[in-house]
Amino acid sequence: MKQQEITMEKIVSLCKRRGFIFPCSEIYGGFANSYSFGPYGTELKNNIKKLWWEKFVSQREDIVGIDGPILLHPKVWEASGHTTGFNDAMADCKECKKRFRADHLVEEATGRDMEGRLEEMTKILKEKKIKCPECQASNWTEVKNLNMMFKTEMNGINEPVYLRPETAGAIFIEFKNILDSMRVKIPFGIAQIGKAFRNEIVAGNFIFRIREFEQMEIEYFFNPEMKWEDLFEKWLKLQEEFAMELGVKKTDLRRLEHPKAKLSHYSKKTVDIEYKFPFGFKELYGLAHRGDFDLSQHSKASNQKLEYFDAENNKRFIPHVLEPTFGLDRSILAALLSAYTEEAIPTPGPSREGNYSSEIRIVMKFPKKLAPIKAAVFPLLKNKPELVKKAKSIYDELKLKFMCEFDDHGNIGKRYRRQDEIGTPYCVTVDFDSLEDKAATVRDRDTMKQERVEINKLENYLVNGLR
Ligand code: GAP
């Protein structure tokens, strides 16, 4: 059957209905495009983080992991240029008081790239009578640069403290500690997964752009004399490979290289890896060659030597760095979109028109490693204590091995439907025969095929299937 169109509405609705992701503070009317991960969303998120950590930290000898704080010394953000340069050009509508990205409004109306040209944008908003997307008025304030970092206060510190806008900052400032405490040899990387905060004006498209999100980042340090082009290509491939491990199709990915004119002075190359979201190709991950900018800046600002000593060649240098960055929330969204499948399944009786009718089955075909629940165990009937007892004892064993669920609500068809929608690879049903033949029926999520498996071989059967 032809795959139905996957819309954001379908994903948002499934996420709420099935406990993946909820709009946050909903009982108070919602809050600023923020979301809570429900029980299945949290499992999915943890599974993605685990997959990433295994691929880029545990299974590599050249990358170590850290977990730094969200609140760092304010000088970190001065040195990295975020205090002065991490801005978006904004204009307010004087009528409805809503704030918008002025560069987006002007670019949409003129097709021109307006980066940084505030006065010109103010002029164009007025002259072209660009309408407010909210109230359709055309009465704008001057265009101003507003910093995207969230400010907070810390007792005893007499200057603003920022919630980190990226995890990378916490990595660079531990470069020296890693050199001093670990036996890393160049090239090597430092990885981190954690929260980042950005005062985005245009949050939206569900969890694509939010103000509080998570990043999985690596700073990969190498000798500046090394040929970096091959390394860059290797990292791009690894990033694409990771996306495909989430279930993303290669054809839904593309690379977008930043034009040379738009690169920061220190960067030799930056490439976005874009994913085909329902609202168009947009950035999923990024890879930047950042030269020695960060270490040099932190070295100058802190008055500390942030150099690597190459004992073999008796040389000291400030390493250059490649920065592969992965948005965790966008990974989750891409995994949800890639897994979402609608299938027609024939239903037994003829429809009113006399043809055999078919029902739409929604199934989240996550790679098994990512599935929030690996197996669900059912007694065929809820009101038969001997079946419930047997199913419970199977569940009690299996839950020690992986995330499982016990379900005795409604009929089997409804239970399958629910497990399909949360992407559970296997459903195990205990029926009357089970009491005699000591076997249960295992149903496969993708093929819907059912197989009779001996109960004492069930764990092995599932473990093998989940590999
Ligand atoms: N350290 C480099 C850095 O932060 P970035 O392109 O600004 O680069 C990295 O962000 C990744 O973080 C993006 O590729 C995206 O996946 C994710 N990201 C950025 N802003 C986000 C937001 N407001 N909401 C969700 N994810 C975001």
Image: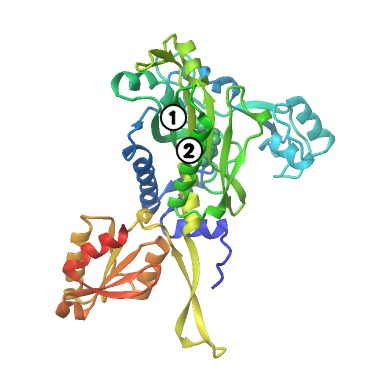
Side of 169 where 9 appears, left or right: right
Question: What x and y, as percent, mark residue 417?
Answer: 40, 69
Q: What residue sits 23% from the left and 76% below the top?
A: 383
Q: Nearer the viewer, residue 328 or 322?
A: 322
Percent of width and height locating residue 316: 42, 13
Q: Quadrant of residue 317?
A: top left
Left or right of residue 136: residue 186 = left
Is residue 23 something one can see in this rendering? Answer: no
Vertical position of residue 407 compared to residue 116: above or below: below
In the picture shown, does residue 322 fall above or below 358? above
Quadrant in which the N terminus appears:
bottom right
Q: Which mark is residue 72?
A: none
State the residue at coordinates (21%, 69%). Answer: 391
Q: Amino acid at mark 2?
A: Trp
CB contact under 8 Å: marks 1 and 2: yes
Identify the residue at image location x=44%, y=29%. 219
The image quadrant of residue 458 is bottom left
- How many labels, in total? 2
The residue to which callout 1 is attached is 220
Q: Amino acid at mark 1?
A: Tyr
Q: Which residue is mark 2?
A: 235
Is residue 45 rendered to the left or right of residue 463? right
Q: Residue at x 57, y 52 (%)?
A: 277
